[in-house]
Image (cartoon, rainbow, N blue to C red):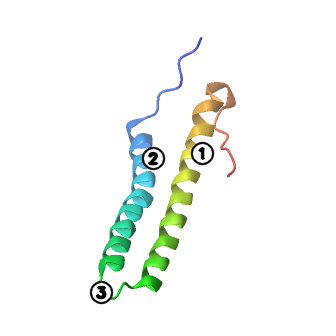
Amino acid sequence: MTAPPRSSGSDIRAILHQLGQPLSAILSNAQAVKRLLASDPADVPEARAALGDIIAQSKQAAKIFRRLEAQVCAGPESGDRRAES
């Protein structure tokens, strides 16, 4: 059994940055929805728009995870080929 290839520190930092952006946006938008719905009267249109942003950012994070998974599962024998999303 061969060990998986090691990623460089810069590769790991890039991945963390790519994941951090959509995850931070999801958190910010979720907090905004909570505030918008707690206001009197509730700002439902703005909350709905923020929920749309949460969905979009969640899809972006999932896409990054799938790309990373494809790279990790491909192993060293696949060379530098990238999985298409």
Q: Position of residue 69 (x, y in %)?
A: 58, 38
Q: Earlier in the sequence, mark 2 or mark 1?
A: 2
Foreground mark, 2 or 1, reads 1
Q: Position of residue 82 (x, y in %)?
A: 65, 44
* Mark seen at residue 3: none
Q: How many marks?
A: 3
Q: Which amino acid, mark 2?
A: Ile
Q: Nearer the viewer, residue 76 or 61?
A: 61
Residue that badge 1 annotates:
66
Q: Secondary structure at mark 2?
A: helix
Q: Which amino acid, mark 1?
A: Arg
Q: Which amino acid, mark 3?
A: Asp
* Mark seen at residue 40: 3
Foreground mark, 2 or 3, reads 3
| Left or right, 85 with reference to 54 | right
| Left or right, 15 with reference to 4 | left
Q: Earlier in the sequence, mark 3 or mark 1?
A: 3
Say few, some or many: other residues with alpha carbon within 10 Å of mark 2 (under 14 / 14 to 19 / 20 or more): some
* Mark seen at residue 15: 2
| Left or right, 35 with reference to 19 | left
Compared to residue 4, the image places residue 23 above or below, namely below
